[in-house]
Amino acid sequence: MARNKKQKIQRPKALPPKGFRDYFGSEVTERGEMLRQIAEVYHRYGFDPLETAAVETVEALGKFLPDVDRPNAGVFAWQDEDTNWMALRYDLTAPLARVYAQFRNDLPSPYRRYAMGPVWRNEKPGPGRYRQFYQCDADTVGSASVAADAEICAMLSDTLETVGIPRGDYIVRVNNRKVLNGVLEAVGLPADDTNMRDAVLRTIDKFDKVGLGGVRELLGKGRLDASGAYIDGVGLSDDQAEPVLAFLVSKSDDAAKTLANLRDAVGNSETGRQGVEDLEKIGTLMAAQGYGSDRIVIDPSVVRGLGYYTGPVYEAELTFEILDDKGRKRQFGSVAGGGRYDDLVKRFTGQEVPATGVSIGVDRLLAALREKGRLGSVAKGPVVVTVMDRDRMGDYQAMVAELRNAGIRAEMYLGNPKNFGNQLKYADKRQSPVAVIEGGNEFESGVVQIKVLALGARLASEIETTEEWKAQPAQIEVKRTDLVAEVRKMIARAESQS
């Protein structure tokens, strides 16, 4: 008779969903500090905070709706009990459009708001590309003035410098969708020929990859790509392609020359002329505020997102070099972008409402600061009060309370106190600056021992003589009444020498 084998228990895998990750201690602290710094700049510029729900109706989000039964392409969507579709927000701009349309009679006009938080994209994940990430947005809704666009550019520059990207390591590039529309008019493409216009836009977007010659071929009959495959072109004649090519190479070291080149590229287009005038006004406003070409420049090569924006567009690019996975040098690239989008609120109200704004990719910005070693993230774990006598837990907790009341992060060791070495190992793992030790003898004498953990580890590898050790003690005995003052001094000392 066969024995019944015990059925194996199927336990869930301790893994997050694909494209998601967990964030621990210093990562969360660093992000929180960056959000605080960005909010401080946004607030200084007069923007008010807005917090919306992570979930919106798919109808309100709108942008990703495909022509299929299940509207979840690009978003994480589900059907509610009342048959309505809902989804996690994919950005912070779509919720703003809904809020403004809903509360427009109560909000000031223009309405200036900033928002921060996670967004979700149902896209294929890859290295460093996750389905949940943080954004920091600031938008002005209800103003058609290019002064609002110039202000966003200035604020973006200030924000980058505030979080630790010094002048010279970034540039804010500014372009205008109207200029490109003028170029398309000069090409002879009618406004209602959206397919051809979109094809030209997609080709322009490849300029940084294939260069001017590649764009020329793709605007015409087509070209062979690196794999040898033939890519069909847009089908423009040489004369039609010329304004597009002139637009792409119009940037000069001199802003006035760049604007002159753009005027030539747009030809007789009134829309294009207005776009160039807008850029000129932005340049004048930037100069009046003291923002030179070392921070903000007019650059027609900014083409990403031009299918979405209706006026000025801007992108913040980090210009320092890093090494890629293969050890090759490359620039870090874009960490923020935005522009004018005058059609978004119209979806709800039927009326055009001018709006402009910027979105900062927090995770990319944090990655850039880590790459350059500029986060200054010396871990600040809690002071650990060790336990030497189980019968005196109240005394140890009193020390912890004193330290906390003085604004010092502290905790009492709550594990098994039998092995004192494990307590110090715990403190090390917590990246504690100091540990407080009070055994029976110290208690009777009214003293405590304070051990500087990080400093002790450093000294142990550097000090060679007893005299040097005595000159830089990693553990001292102090009066119990001086606990708070001495802990504060030793933390400061450890931080200064770290």
Image (spheres, rainbow, N blue to C red):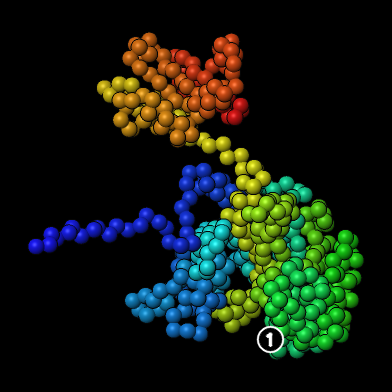
In the picture as drawn, the residue positioned furthest to the left comes out as 1
In the foreground, 105 or 299: 299
- For disc 1, the neighbor class at 10 Å (few under 14, some 14 to 19, many from 20) is few
State the image coordinates of residue 464 (x, y, percent, origin top left): 59, 16
Q: Quarter holding the N terminus?
A: bottom left
In the foreground, 424 or 149: 424
In the rendered image of this protein, does residue 207 appear above or below residue 22? below
Q: Residue at x 75, y 79 (%)?
A: 223
State the image coordinates of residue 219 (x, y, percent, origin top left): 77, 81
State the image coordinates of residue 401 (x, y, percent, origin top left): 39, 29
Relative placement, left or right, of 104 versus 153 is left
In the rendered image of this protein, does residue 361 appear above or below residue 424? below
State the image coordinates of residue 181 (x, y, percent, origin top left): 76, 79
Q: Residue at x 89, y 76 (%)?
A: 264
Q: Is residue 178 visible?
A: no
Relative placement, left or right, of 492 versus 244 is left
Q: Residue at x 48, y 50 (%)?
A: 23
Q: Residue at x 82, y 56 (%)?
A: 293
Relative placement, left or right, of 361 versus 260 is left
In the foreground, 1 or 359: 1
> Which quarter of the figure has residue 462?
top right
> Which quarter of the figure has residue 190?
bottom right
Q: Secondary structure at mark 1?
A: helix
Q: Tell how many labels.
A: 1
In the rendered image of this protein, does residue 31 appear above or below residue 361? above
Q: Is residue 122 visible?
A: yes
Q: Quarter holding the C terminus?
A: top right
In the picture as drawn, the residue positioned furthest to the front comes out as 1
Which residue was labeled with disc 1? 194
Query: In the image, what residue type sits under mark 1?
Result: Thr
